[in-house]
Amino acid sequence: MTAVTVRLPDGSTKEFEPGTTALEFARSIGPRLAKAAVAATFDGQPVDLSRALPDGAEVTVVTATTPLGREVLRHSTAHVLAQAVLRLWPGAHFAIGPVIEDGFYYDFELPSGAHFTDEDLERIALEMRAIMAEDQPFVRHEHSIAEGLELFGDQPFKREIIEAVGAGQDEVDAVSEGAGEHGVSTYWNSPAFTDLCRGPHVPGTGTLGHFALMRVAGAYWRGDEKRQQLQRIYGTAWESEDALAEHLHRLEEAEKRDHRKLGVELDLFSFPHELGGGLAVWHPKGGIVRKLMEDYSRQRHQDGGYEFVFTPHLANANLFETSGHLGFYKDGMYPPMEMDNGTYYPKPMNCPMHCLIFASRQRSYRELPLRLFELGTVYRYERAGTLHGMMRIRGFTQDDSHIYCTEEQLGDEITSLLDFVMSVLRAFGFSEFTANLSTKDPDKYVGSDEIWDKATEALRQALERHGLPYEIKEGDAAFYGPKIDIDVRDAIGRTWQLSTIQCDFNHPERFDLEYVGADNARHRPIMLHRALFGSIERFFAILVEHFAGALPTWLAPEQVRVLGVRDDHQGYADQVAHDLRSLGIRVEVDPATEPLGARIRKAKMLKIPYILVVGDDDVAAGTVGVNRRGSERPDRGVPVAEFTTALLDEVAERTVPETADDAVAG
RNA sequence: GCCUGGGUAGCUCAGUCGGUAGAGCAACGCACUCGUAAUGCGUAGGUCAGGAGUUCGAUUCUCCUCCCAGGCUCCA
């Protein structure tokens, strides 16, 4: 037989005897590479290390520290999890076990409807370690579909996956699970355990070990609420004990930023039981932040040519019949109230009422675009299990704007809207944005194809002009028009969907909105929905988490705290505070009833941007000691005027602090 | 809504194999008067989420309800 020739990533070629495996290939490059290898790729396709090199392919070795390598580790660990569960619960059925961000899960159905408990996790982890100690090989086999069905005769979920392919259904899941049109692939670990899988896997279970089982959860089979609920176990796995520890540490850090925790610690808001689920009260410290957010928002809207409107919290059912909300979203609305002259609902959206304002008199093209803005509080019945602090709540306030414009104005209006939205988000400290453009669902839409195309193109151009990276989500638009959603990236890399700009061809129709054009004829306006923060509550929560509670000075509930070193500095401390307060600074004085160190600590824990310490030297010289949030050491002897000027400047500029952990940890 | 785990002082938690509870921090009072992340002593604070049942007796066991956490589903 002739030798096989493969290409290396650096472009060079190498010859091997036929049948040489990827692992032997790695060894030929270096023993350390071979040791670190968990899989390989042939022409970009991930494969097991035991695969023979194909002639002419480009071959790379996948190590555990790469994203693909971690996927292999996690996927292999998921198999061991399944094996352990099947050992501990004979007769259990196993479903799917994919890799997810930072980990994996596996879904099971336990015999006689049993459920996993938290204690079970420990037993399962122990069993997994035993399997890893046995260093079982992952041996790949290929079967026909019929053989696959036979092999998994007592595993209904595996059979369903295979049958889905056999029936010619387009099943992305099935492919990643190892079932394809040409047959199925399996991995055999031991006589007692074979799993359906595409692979690749590490050579043996002994390669694994740096994992943790995180939690148990219920999950619907195929993600379908109407189908049976399976028992899911989430886990994470890494290439080393250090990497695992780091991951767990990152989770802890994220927990410290949790707005619900910080909401209590910083006295921002609460969810009193007496109020009911999903309903919040804002405490004074959260309240001032909200007021500042709203003040800024109102100012920007005023500057941006918006007009302010106000609408009630309730409306007659007829209004929501007209708008279509009762038809489409009744389940998400609060139940109705019967009153003497009709049925009333708490409003789930502001748009119907804004349409009434538009329709209140005859409109001229000269008035367009008409931009209506309201901080409108809405109520939505969110299902109990979906509530999440301020992020997902039943009563919340939208910074809601509806813009009525002509078809010709659509392009410019969308572009300026996008400018406006991003500029406001930047002021709150976000700098990384991505967008999604959702296009027509061909099976469900209203309006002409022509207007859809035109609007979609206007949205796309606005994104292009802005240089905003975006993805197109085909068919993801609501039935009434295409939309842009804007995601921001926060300080620890999470993305949040915030703003949305939606075209609406339906509401103007339903409310029979018209304007008189320059041609003296009546025309239908186009309506744009635009939420910027989305929900004030949710945006506030995201801000708190983004800054880990250390809000920028302009937003901080308490901007400055003045501490006298001794009692007899109280007069001077009061004077400094009084002067700052008269300039609009939010400042408090903490009297010397406790040692200075204790009072510093208290102020630091509240993440107050500036702590001013004043003692004998300061009284004599008219200075303050400035202890700035995030700085290593205090700055002694700063003239009051100097501090004040810099502070006022920082507030006026809305300077955003560094959000890295080390900057806000203090 | 579904699955798992929870609910004990304002917060974080311990405890009660069934005999109505405890710590640290916070709060309040007194003393201390201090130069950059915890001064000392004392006081007060609980329908042990709510309701029903079993029991001589329930915070503890059982059931129901509410709420919270993590998921699933949903999110105009």
Image (cartoon, rainbow, N blue to C red):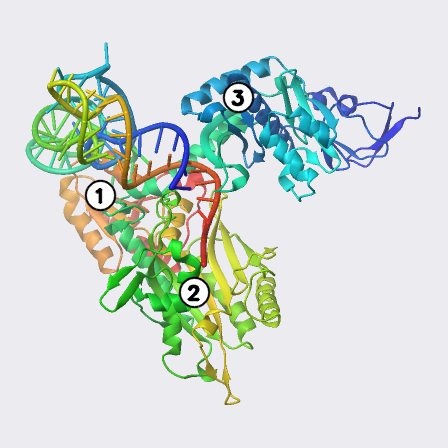
Q: Which residue is mark 1?
A: A563
Closer to viewer: mark 2 or mark 1? 2
Query: What residue appears at the point 56 percent right and 36 percent down from the top-left corner?
Result: A100
Amino acid type shown at disc 1: Leu
Q: Earlier in the sequence, mark 1 or mark 3?
A: 3
Q: Which residue is mark 2?
A: A324
Amino acid type shown at disc 3: Val
Q: Which residue is mark 3?
A: A85
Using the rendered image, report if marks 2 and 3 lie on a common chain: yes
Residue A318 x/y as whole percent: 35, 68
Is A619 rendered above or below residue A141? Answer: below
Badge 1 element: strand
Pick whichever, A219 or A63, lies toward us: A219
Q: CA distance from mark 2 to mark 3?
A: 49 Å
Q: Earlier in the sequence, mark 2 or mark 3?
A: 3
Choose top left, top right, bottom left or bottom right for residue A315.
Answer: bottom left
Pick whichever, B33 or A314, lies toward us: A314
